[in-house]
Image: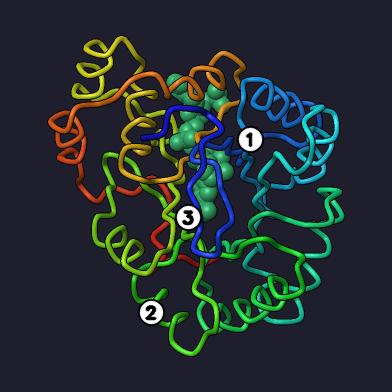
Amino acid sequence: MTQHIADTTVLHNGVKMPWLGLGVWQTKDGDEVIRSVKAAIQAGYRSIDTAAAYNNESGVGAAIKESGVSRDELFITTKVWNADQGYDSTLRAFEESRRKLGLDVIDLYLIHWPVKGKYKDTWRALEKLYRDGAVRAIGVSNFQVHHLEDVLSGSEIVPMVNQVECHPRLTQQELRSFCKSHQIQLEAWSPLMQGNLDIPVLTELAAKYGKSPAQIILRWDLQNGIVTIPKSVTESRIRENGNVFDFTLSDEDIAKLDALNENHRFGPDPDNFNF
Ligand code: NDP
């Protein structure tokens, strides 16, 4: 059971990835992202999730340098954007991300969305980056079971991570068991349902454990073996979201949260997006 903010899961290639990280989608480049990332690192976070599409890799890079924590203690994820998919263009996009972040090696590089007709060529580029040692782990995001089956057929490397929308209203049971059976670590985006936390079961469990609704969900992620990356630009919430290692939800309460599933997405459907 995870008991410390720096605790890690071990990906199938042996690389250690923290169970908890800071998400920075919609966090503004410059002062806002620098303050958020530094506050998270100060609070003990060791993992940051950005993407080329978030337009804040430069600020993330600046914050890492200013944080005073050594590079090898941090785990940095970024993602190749849809418009850059394809073999050569992915390699070029990677160089741009690496330059903006000011890093030689990226810890985890993900395909942001399964762009039809392109994601397998993109995956070959990620395999090359991995073999070249430019990235410590590679993975995908927003891949459904059929996308994963497609990548697994004919590829040499099994993705180490699949980052998908996942929270009590979208528990992703089928995808989770598929990933588990292939040693693909599931990672939850929008774990806090983009701030829509007003659900009676969450309020009830928050009161029972003396925690906040956000903390209840994040603990549910951890106890389910799901890596989680809550986003906040608010220092007190960043600390709050990191303070989920001192209590344990009972099996019965985990089941209550599982039962909130209604396959509800706050974000786009990976089988039907047009960007
Ligand atoms: P989250 O589910 O993490 O929710 C963030 C929202 O919740 C913000 O409005 C934040 O407000 C608020 N919030 C944060 N902490 C608390 C708290 N303790 N109590 C109450 N409200 C809180 O949303 P995201 O969509 O940002 O998802 C998290 C991360 O996942 C992203 O930042 C990104 O890194 C990744 N992601 C990946 C996607 C992909 O396609 N791969 C898609 C979407 C997200 P405030 O900031 O004002 O404090």
Whole-percent x and y of residue 19? 49, 40
Is there CB contact under 8 Å for labels 3 and 2?
A: no
- Residue located beneath label 2 in the image: 149
Decide: is 42 above or below 33.
above
Is there CB contact under 8 Å for labels 1 and 3?
A: no
Element type at mark 2: helix
- Counting other residues with Cα less than 10 Å from the Cα at mark 3, is it few (<14), some (14-19), or many (20 or more)? many
Of callouts 1 and 3, the N-terminal one: 1
Of callouts 3 and 2, the N-terminal one: 2
Question: Mark 1 or 3, which is nearer the eye?
Answer: 1
Decide: is 175 above or below 227.
below
Q: Which three-letter amino acid code belongs to the residue tagged 3?
A: Gln
Q: Residue at x 53, y 74 (%)?
A: 115
Q: Is residue 223 left or right of residue 200?
A: right
**Marks 1 and 3, how far apart in space?**
18 Å
Q: Nearer the viewer, residue 156 or 166?
A: 156
- Residue located beneath label 1 in the image: 46
For ligand 1, tell me if the residue under mark 3 lies within 8 Å. yes
- Residue located beneath label 3 in the image: 163
